[in-house]
Image (tube, rainbow, N blue to C red):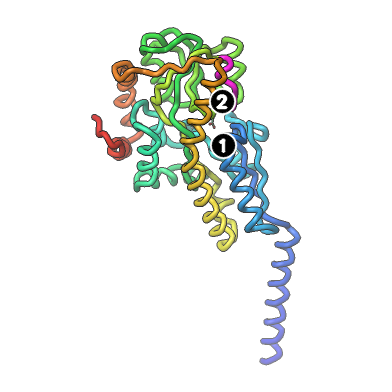
């Protein structure tokens, strides 16, 4: 009896040490984090801070590689690569998940959120949190929301009233809401990957675009867009995502530490995003290459009325509950 207990214990020890040994042999867990923007943007900075904190706190256990500027995967293939675990972290803009859930299109609705503060409130409330899990059936799990900023309209001509956009071709992200928004103006929306935006504007393939200041500045879009209208008509934010099989397969203790780091990085990104965008706005103005057009209250209202019908059009797909929750987060309530 005693002998068999000793043998069993020895076996268990051997197995445990073999397990530990093979874990060491396998080396640290590798997290590839790919994205499509520059290192200097809110998302680019967030990815680098995540890498830095992981390397400080989980050295030898987790290794992070960051691939900015569509250098590993771009808009066309990054979500498929994530689902196949060829990359483990992404932070696509909320406009890029349409294929996997329609609910997130709430973020694309024009003039729904007054500012980033309102977006922030929605993301923190129960409905916003629920949307992080809305794609688990598709092997995508949301870990956090990261801000970029409010979008501005740029073009080769001055856009003061919505009618000024009629007939112009605008680059859009792959979102039905954004397509409808430009159709509403009598403009021609064209879906293009982010990596192609500069060339498409430079060559005249499209004449306009919508972007936050940080993306305009870091991609030098202002050098090929002589007019930028400060519309703040919609938000461009991100969801940090992984695939559940990978994420929940990380040993519990390590995953908890990673999730703690993500909370810290999220706080830092979201606290700095607005200031970073305002700084890039000033840099664009200082460059003298584009005229920044401010709208009067009446002009802004005209843009809002022109785009507003898109809400009704997408309510059935997004869900009345989600839309209702999003409409309660502005300080000034609107109907
Ligand atoms: C875009 O395609 O315009 C953006 O989603 C790019 C980004 O990641 O900010």
- Dominant secondary-structure state across the stretch colored magenta: helix
Q: Can residue 245 be seen by looking at this rendering?
A: yes
10 Å neighbourhood of mark 1: few (<14), some, or many (≥20)? many
Q: Position of residue 260 (x, y in %)?
A: 52, 56
Q: Which residues are magenta?
A: 217-224
Name of the residue lying farthest toward the right: 25
The structure residue drawn at horizontal position 48% and vertical position 30%, both measured from the top left corner, is: 278
Q: Position of residue 23 (x, y in %)?
A: 70, 62
Q: Secondary structure at mark 1?
A: helix
The structure residue drawn at horizontal position 53% and vertical position 43%, both measured from the top left corner, is: 241
List the residue tagged with mark 2: 217
Which quarter shows the N terminus? bottom right
The structure residue drawn at horizontal position 36% and vertical position 18%, both measured from the top left corner, is: 295
10 Å neighbourhood of mark 2: few (<14), some, or many (≥20)? many
Which quarter shows the C terminus? top left
Q: Nearer the viewer, mark 1 or mark 2?
A: 2
Q: Which mark is residue 266?
A: none
Q: Position of residue 187 (x, y in %)?
A: 42, 12
Q: Secondary structure at mark 2?
A: helix
Q: Is residue 1 above or below residue 242?
A: below
Q: Is residue 298 above or below residue 78?
A: above
The structure residue drawn at horizontal position 63% and vertical position 31%, both measured from the top left corner, is: 69
Name of the residue lying farthest toward the bottom: 2
Q: Can residue 83 be seen by looking at this rendering?
A: no
Callout count: 2
The mark that comes first in sequence, 1 or 2, is 1
* Residue 186 included in the magenta stretch of the image: no
Q: Are marks 1 and 2 in contact (CB under 8 Å)?
A: no
How many angstroms separate mark 1 from mark 2 (CA)? 26 Å
List the residue tagged with mark 1: 79
Closest to the observer, 6 or 141:
141
């Amino acid at each position: 009896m005693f002998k068999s207990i000793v043998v069993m214990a020895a076996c268990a020890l051997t197995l445990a040490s073999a397990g530990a040994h093979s874990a060491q042999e396998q080396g640290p867990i590798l997290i590839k984090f790919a994205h499509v923007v520059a290192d200097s943007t809110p998302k680019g900075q967030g990815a680098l801070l995540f890498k830095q904190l992981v390397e400080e706190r989980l050295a030898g256990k987790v290794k992070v590689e960051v691939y900015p500027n569509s250098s590993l995967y771009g808009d066309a293939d990054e979500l498929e690569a994530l689902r196949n675990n060829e990359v483990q972290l992404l932070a696509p803009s909320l406009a890029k998940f349409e294929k996997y859930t329609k609910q997130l299109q709430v973020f694309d609705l024009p003039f729904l959120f007054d500012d980033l503060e309102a977006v922030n409130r929605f993301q923190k409330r129960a409905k916003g949190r629920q949307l992080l899990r809305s794609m688990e059936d598709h092997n995508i799990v949301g870990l956090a929301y990261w801000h970029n900023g409010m979008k501005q309209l740029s073009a080769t001509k001055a856009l003061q009233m919505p009618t000024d956009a009629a007939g112009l071709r605008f680059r859009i992200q792959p979102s039905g809401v954004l397509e409808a928004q430009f159709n509403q103006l009598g403009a021609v929306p064209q879906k293009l990957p982010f990596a192609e935006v500069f060339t498409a504007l430079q060559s005249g393939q499209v004449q306009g675009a919508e972007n936050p200041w940080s993306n305009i500045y870091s991609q030098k879009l202002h050098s090929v867009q002589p007019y930028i209208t400060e519309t703040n008509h919609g938000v461009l934010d991100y969801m940090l995502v992984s695939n559940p099989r990978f994420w929940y397969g990380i040993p519990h203790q390590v995953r908890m530490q990673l999730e703690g780091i993500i909370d810290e990085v999220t706080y830092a990104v979201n606290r700095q995003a607005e200031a970073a965008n305002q700084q890039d706005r000033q840099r664009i103005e200082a460059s003298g290459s584009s005229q920044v057009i401010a709208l009067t209250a009446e002009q802004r209202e005209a843009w809002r009325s022109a785009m507003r019908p898109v809400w009704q059009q997408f309510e059935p797909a997004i869900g009345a509950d989600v839309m209702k929750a999003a409409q309660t987060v502005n300080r000034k309530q609107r109907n």
